[in-house]
Image: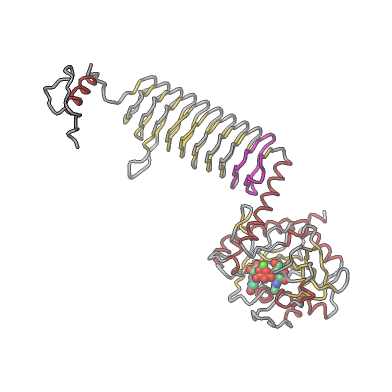
Amino acid sequence: MIGLMPANDLAVLILAAGKGTRLKSSLAKVLHRAGGRSLVEHVLAACAPLKPRKTVVVVGHQAEQVSALVEPLEAETVLQQPQRGTGHAMQVARRALGAAKLALVLPGDAPLIRTETLRAMVAAHRAAKSAATILSAVVSDPSGYGRILRKSATTVQAIAEESQLTDEQRELNEINSSIYCFTLEKLWPALAQVKPNNKHRELYLTDAVAVLAAKNETVLAHLAPDPREALGCNTRTDLAEVDRIFRERKRAELMNEGVSIQLPETVLIDPAVTAGEDTVLEPGVQLLGKTKIGERCTIRTGSVLSDAILGDEVVVESHSLITQSRLDDNVTVGPFARLRTGTHLKSGSRVGNFVETKKVTVGEGAKVPHLTYLGDANVGSKTNIGAGTITCNYDGFQKHPTTIGKGVFIGSDSTLVAPVRIGDGAYVAAGSTITENVPPDGLGIARGRQINKPRWASRKRREVASAKRPNKKARPRRKSKARPRKSRRR
Ligand code: UD1
Ligand code: CA
């Protein structure tokens, strides 16, 4: 039971007030997205399973937007204005941390951190009764990071920031991830001794580490099992790299669950997406938002599904866009279909190429095979919608519904002017503009009646030919030796 109890002495503190100058963006750094979520959401998601007594986020740049994002995720925010460095951010959060004994401190821009690593780090901190534990990582390119200066095999003397490094220290490749566990009653007095002795005139949290070590407090370095967990997103290149890693993790997760992914590096899948066994994703597919896919489905190349719910054995042909829609078992869609919000295709139905739908239910086994717009419509089971059918759902002021019954046949190129009802089993003649309800089993025909004019075309051709001749009386039977004709139209 003990293992299931929340760690009541532990609070989480996320430092997210910085601007992220190096991203060259009007958007605060932690709001940038990678792997389908904002950076700060990833950090919160990694901490949540630790069940901290509270989670505090220090906000500054775009404080309102960052607060609006994190507060619904059960985090409390503290404003740091102006931002005087990571040590200052820590001080600003002091009151909010309340009675917590331990603080797990994380930057908002290191989204690859995993729960298991945090758990192990906190456990090591507790076991050693440490004052501070630093998550470190050994990396091939340490530039831009603070370096760990070791005291012993397990303990730390100080963290040297990039700008303060000696040539010798520059070679060190163990870096500070900026993820720490602090025993707060030890941290506060140490932090009070830190001075803004750097070119930015900032209070560095890293400097508190040297103060603690100098007081002979235990300062541990806990090495991250995967150095990528320490990757901070300072530049657009970092963001792209982090995104790539998240996407790779997610694809690996789905492949482990029995999903086939062709040319996996071209397939983009958001974190909340699920897919069933034997589903196949072709190259260039994107599965976004809360998309859920059943078993034995095929999603062909270039299709983008966003918040789409698919049953089993659904086929999405190439280059289809599906947003906030539900497709039941055995549905086939596309190629080049666009299913917009509120589309529900019932089992066995088919929506073909160049069809757009919005707020539409298509009944079981019904077919909308080509070149159609259906909006605010209900289509009954086994109904066939001919090519080029349009529901005129908008009169310039309001939207109106179209109800098409079961087993209906709508001829090609029909326009159905809503509100209108087509009864069960009815027919609509091709090319009709339907403005009135069609009764069940009836035929609606609404188009100009055809008139055939026999020999009209041959007569017309003769007329045109004679109009071009210089002398209207010179009929073609007599071969003229006259000089080549000139068109009058010149
Ligand atoms: C920091 C560390 C460095 C470490 C690196 C890891 C310091 C001085 N340096 O450097 O040792 O290797 O992270 O990525 O801590 N923030 C605030 N308020 C502030 C300043 C920063 O909330 O006044 C937040 C930022 O939003 C960011 C985090 O703290 O999320 C880290 O700040 P950042 O400027 O990215 O520090 P680095 O230069 O990367
Ligand atoms: Ca950083």
Position of residue 142 in the picture relative to residue 74 (left or right): right
Nearest the viewer among 450 and 416 is 450
Position of residue 402 in the picture relative to residue 57 (left or right): left
Picture coordinates of residue 209, whole percent (x, y): 78, 75
Residue 165 in view (yes/no)? yes
Picture coordinates of residue 353, whole percent (x, y): 48, 33
Q: Quadrant of residue 67?
A: bottom right
Q: Is residue 390 above or below residue 114?
A: above
Task: Let me know if residue 274 is in the magenta part.
Answer: yes
Please state the quadrant of the image where ligand 1 appears. bottom right
Q: Is residue 417 above or below residue 130?
A: above
Task: Let me know if residue 380 is in the magenta part.
Answer: no
Q: Quadrant of residue 40?
A: bottom right
Residue 97 in view (yes/no)? no
Nearest the viewer among 355 and 444 is 355
Q: Quadrant of residue 173?
A: bottom right
Q: Tell me which colouring the rendered structure shows.
A: secondary structure
* Quadrant position of the C terminus in the picture: top left
Numbered range of the magenta stretch: 262-288
Total numbered badges shown on the rendered structure: 0
Q: Residue at x 36, y 35 (%)?
A: 418
Picture coordinates of residue 124, whole percent (x, y): 84, 64
Residue lying furthest right in this view?
153
Position of residue 76 in the picture relative to residue 206 (left or right): left
Q: Residue at x 88, y 69 (%)?
A: 153
Picture coordinates of residue 108, whole percent (x, y): 66, 64
